[in-house]
Amino acid sequence: MSRNPRTHEFLCPLIVIGLLACSEAEGEGRDFGPTWGNGDSTGEDEEDASLESNGDGDGDGFGDGDGDDDGDGLGNGDGDGDGFGDGDGDGDGDGDDGSEPLSGTPTEENLRVAFISDQGHNNNTTEVLELVKAEGAAFLVIAGDFDYKDEPSAWEALTTATLGPDYPIFAVVGNHDEDEFFGSDGYQSKIILRQQNAIDDGASCTGDPGRNNSCTYKGLFLAMSGVGVLDGKGDSADYLREQLANNDAIWSVCVWHKNMNDMQAGGKSNATGWGVYQACQDEAGIVITGHEQSYSRTLTLTDLGNETSAHGATGQPELMVVGQGSTFVSVVGLGGRAIRDYEAKKHDDDTWWATIYTTNFYLNSWLEVEDWSPKHGALFIDFNVEGDPNKAHAYFKNTDGLIVDKYDIVRDGNSGG
């Protein structure tokens, strides 16, 4: 698929799985984007006898439920026609056709986790932390760059003032943290104390806190890395791959600070190598990074590191599919520090974005928004929702209470272990 994020021009992808029909979905506010599977592109749940596959759907661009249990809406199955790509044709949207859930350890039901990075030390920082608390997140994950002041005690004091002394936090080092990371009063010492709150509540952790470190808490597996800051590219990729492969959690999240230029919407350069991304893609880990001070989210990706294939971008913007060989990437750099611009010269040819939220460009699930006021905020992911351990729902909310982005996630295939 080829798409210019600012013009919304699309070309139909070539997919060699079943029979694919690609057309433009009609309707107010969604007059662009391919329609997948045997949908009629009118939004009507009716059989389209002109297309020679067995799944039927409504053509609204969300997948038609093809009966192959992978949620992508492609193939020869008997879909239910609701257009949401549940894959089993039974109409309940779970993709399992009444069979047993995927193997692996589930998270707690309706587990809400918050993700931020690039905090700073100001009123915006406080408002974001207050948002995390107000939304009822069970714990917070910070993808680096804490207070930008090299004052670990000040960072911890602000966190305590908003979230309290016992709130569980997991964090990785950012490039603005490395000078004061070590030592008895360094950032790592504060991370250890916050991580201990989770351990006291049943979490299990291994590795070096704030760097290459992994934890299981409330059923969620976190594979974290200091790649590009205090840890090497190859070592970090190997570490993440091994940790992800050897755990049995249904849901895993990879977290580090820096990124590759293609995996953010601003001007940051290549810093981590593709190995860490590929390890998480191969082993079904959602990728969360920071560094670029904006918010962005890709489509489902199946070929990370291969720009000529658009990193294997596939599917629709409101539905992410995570499995062994597929993931998505989100940058959560709006924790309180100044918000950056979208860099058109670097990214107008990118075809893998679902949502971009910056000072000068806001793309919301392929729909460009012309009037907005950029604010800081946090990403929230609810795991094990609607009674299904293989479903999750995510949203990015800003400090004005606006839902900037929202989407569903399905876990496809068996656990990483």
Image: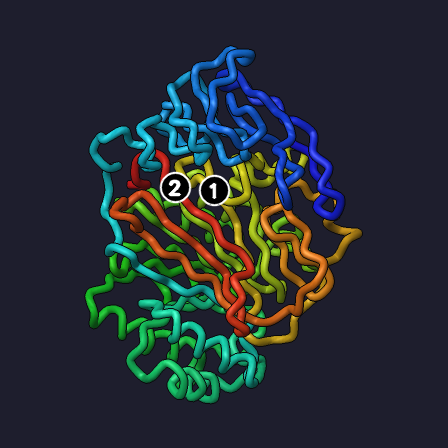
- x, y percentage for residue 193? 32, 78
Q: What secondary structure is found at the residue carrying circle 1?
A: strand
Q: Which of 123/215 is in front?
A: 123
- Write down the residue under mark 2: 410
**Cα distance, mark 1 to mark 2?**
8 Å
Q: Image check: 336 left or right of 79?
A: right
Look at the picture and state if 368 lies above or below 134: above
How many residues crowd around disc 2 within 10 Å: few (fewer than 14), some, or many (20 or more)? many
Q: Image check: 367 left or right of 413?
A: right
Q: Assess whether mark 2 and mark 1 are in contact (beta carbons under 8 angstroms).
A: yes
Looking at the image, which residue is at 20% across and 72% down? 200
Q: Determine the image quadrant of residue 148.
A: bottom right
- x, y percentage for residue 209? 37, 68
Q: Which of 237/392 is in front?
A: 392
How many residues crowd around disc 1 within 10 Å: few (fewer than 14), some, or many (20 or more)? many
Q: Earlier in the sequence, mark 1 or mark 2?
A: 1
Q: What secondary structure is found at the residue carrying circle 2?
A: strand
Q: Which of 88/290 is in front?
A: 88
Q: Determine the image quadrant of residue 10.
A: top right
User: In the displayed image of the protein, which residue is found farthest to the right?
Assistant: 345
Q: Which of 343/197 is in front?
A: 343
Q: Image check: 277 left or right of 388?
A: right
User: For the residue marked with disc 2, what is the amino acid?
Assistant: Val
Instruction: Name the quadrant of the N terminus.
Output: top right
Look at the picture and state if 316 lies above or below 151: above
Instruction: Name the quadrant of the C terminus.
Output: top left
Looking at the image, which residue is at 54% across and 28% down? 36
- x, y percentage for residue 98? 23, 31
Looking at the image, which residue is at 31% across and 50% down? 385
Residue 143 appearing in the image: no
User: For the residue marked with disc 1, what is the amino acid?
Assistant: Leu
- Write down the residue under mark 1: 319
